[in-house]
Amino acid sequence: MQVAVLNGVNLNMLGRRDPAMYGTVTLSQLETMVYGWGKELHATVRCWQTNSEGEYVTMIHEAVTGTDGLIVNPGAWTHYSYAIRDALEIFPRPVVEVHLSDIEGREEWRRTSVIADVVSHRILGKGPDGYREALQHLVETV
């Protein structure tokens, strides 16, 4: 099983950005955990991160070939990027939306996810463990 994990805008600042909200784990540490969980679950995982919305869309397009499922955390793009939503709508296999914090319990503007209706599963507010749960979900679903 091939899984792509796509992290979006500002997630490269994990560990520095509001540790009370996002924790102290860096993106590199998170990716190491994700690769380990993938190995345990017999899934091949590839992690990507970008601060460019167009590049994020391109990563989704590239994942259409040879990827069995996506885990996406677009960051702030979750709340307004219809370009990312449209790209995810094209992806023909399961997509899991993950957020480290519980976006539905935060500021009003963060409570909207324009991608919620095109993903197969959502995991909110479980910190890094949300990525493990997303991998487990894909392994059980695909």
Image (spheres, rainbow, N blue to C red):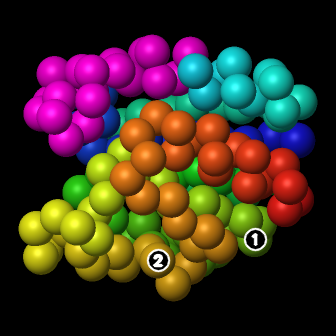
Q: Give yes or no for residue 124 being in the magenta stretch.
A: no
**How far apart are the two marked residues, 1 and 2, measured between alpha carbons?**
16 Å
Mark 1 Cα-neighbour bin, 10 Å: few <14, some 14–19, many ≥20: few
The quarter of the picture where the C terminus appears is bottom right
Asked whether, in this view, residue 48 is left or right of residue 20, the answer is right
Tell me the residue at 24%/74% (across/down): 111
Residue 1 screen position, x and y as percent: 88, 41
* Looking at the image, residue 36 lies above or below residue 137: above
Q: Give yes or no for residue 21 being in the magenta stretch.
A: yes
**Front-lying residue, 14 or 91:** 14
* Looking at the image, residue 93 lies above or below residue 56: below
Residue 26 screen position, x and y as percent: 34, 19
Identify the element where label 2 is drawn: helix
Magenta segment range?
14-32
Tell me the residue at 43%/16% (across/down): 28
Labels 1 & 2 near each other (Cβ < 8 A): no
Mark 2 Cα-neighbour bin, 10 Å: few <14, some 14–19, many ≥20: some
Identify the element where label 1 is drawn: loop
Residue 125 screen position, x and y as percent: 37, 53
* Looking at the image, residue 119 lies above or below residue 53: below
Asked whether, in this view, residue 94 is left or right of residue 54, the answer is right
Q: Which residue is mark 2?
A: 116
Any part of residue 21 in sight: yes
Q: Which residue is mark 1?
A: 92
Asked whether, in this view, residue 64 is left or right of residue 68, the answer is left
| Mark 2 residue type | Ala
